[in-house]
Image: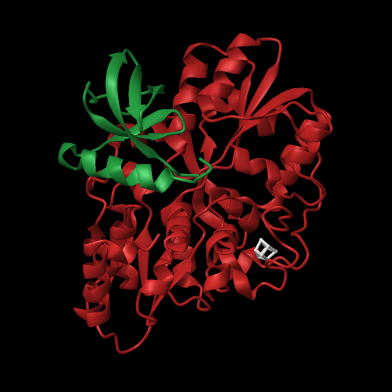
Amino acid sequence: MCLAIPAEIIKINENLAEVESMGIKKEVDITLVPDAVKGDYVIVHAGFAIQIIDKKEAKTIKKYWNEYFDGQKY
Amino acid sequence: MNILTDKNIKHIVESLYKSNLSESISIMEVCGTHTMAISKYGLRQIIPETINLISGPGCPVCVTPASDIDTILEITENYDISLFTFGDMLHVPGSRSSLYNKKSEGKDINICYSPLDALNFAKQNPSRKVIFLAIGFETTIPLTSVVIKRAYTEKINNFFIYNVHKLIPEALETLLKDERIKIDAFLCPGHVSAIIGSTHYNLIAEKYKIPCVISGFEPFDILESIDMIIKQIKNNKHEVQIQYNRVVREEGNPFAIKLIYEIFDKTDSIWRGLGNIPDSGLKLKEDFLEFDAKIHFPVKKIRSKEPPGCQCGDVLKGIKKPFECGLFSNICRPDNPIGPCMVSSEGSCAAYYRYEQLKV
Ligand code: SF4
């Protein structure tokens, strides 16, 4: 239930951001990460970005989640 | 998938074997996503037998007591409301029924992905009374806080929450005080800690001399965290360490924490299996009581009972493994769950059923 996935911020429009995760684009609320800027990777949980991911690490996380979601029902 | 073909994983597993522990140790994880990852990747089977991984109360759906489910069911019976909640909640058995059954009977019960879905529905349907069943630990609580604040600012008066949110650090202490449970270290939850940070665990590590490592969710993360714990134990240390440092900072997400306590105060909360834990729950502050479904939709209390034979209480405390429940797999299965630990995809019984049945 606390499942959360990394996504990259493509575009910001006030408290909403367009993010991309595993090739899928969607809109998330970024109220909880007021410092987030375009290009940041964030952790997304139930429609909200909850934390900004350290930039250096973001790419490696992405690779893992692709494998993790393989065959998952989420 | 054989994860041992990954050289980093192979390396860390070798390091675990080299540790040569003289006696066995128990590490408890308190996050359903960890529980699922440990089972899915068969981590229990690739680490030394002296390291016992036990699952704690890390699944919010599982720790919601039957009494709350029963009250929600009564509300759907007695009031014409639209209820929104996360998918796993629907199948959790109350004493007499479940939300899924009520939905089949025609009640307006909806699965949502985000609390925003519930708020938006309320805005678009001002004549409907909308209740969001707010469940989850610190990862999810800021989300509910945002929607309450928004409903307050925008004066949405047909939106309510039935709040069963719970706080993790308080539960850890309760577990440590129970003499029947042997816990030598905690694998702390990554996304709860993304919000609360690491300082909450300092007191626990210090007072109970327990290493606490905040872990990520990849197999490598979990194994590395276990390795960090073992090194601490070997060196007689009991510190809080952050393995998941790409996401978790010492201070957590201060903005989210501040928002939570703008909306809520701490209060006692009843956990399935663990009972009442002081200060482990939240109640809306006075300014926001207009959103409290418990006040606006009163129902008579019914005597709640746990499913007969179900050992979820002991499973949630790490006293019993799912296999030790007499109903596991023969009667209780994901397609016919008797207790919540089999219902939720992150429940221990469901994780063991799905991935570990053939491995014992
Ligand atoms: S196997 Fe089913 S009945 Fe037994 S403890 Fe788990 S959920 Fe409860």
Q: Position of residue A55 (x, y in %)?
A: 17, 36
Determine which quarter of the picture holds residue B111. Answer: top right
Along the line of sight, the residue nearer the viewer: A33 or A12: A12
Judging from the image, what is the letter of the chain drawn in green? A
The picture places residue B40, in percent across and down from the top left corner, at 46, 59
Residue at point 44%, 45% (across, down):
A70
Q: Residue B330: image x %, image y %?
A: 73, 68
Q: Which chain is red?
A: B
Using the image as rendered, state which of residue B347 and residue B139 is in the foreground.
B347
- The structure residue drawn at horizontal position 58% and vertical position 73%, both measured from the top left corner, is B320
Horizontal and vertical percent for residue B114? Answer: 51, 29
In the image, taking residue B345 as reference, residue B69 lies left or right, namely right
Q: Tell me if residue B99 comes above or below residue B279 in the rendering.
A: above
Q: How is the image coloured?
A: by chain
Quarter of the figure that contains the N terminus of chain B? bottom left
Q: Is residue B112 above or below residue A18?
A: below
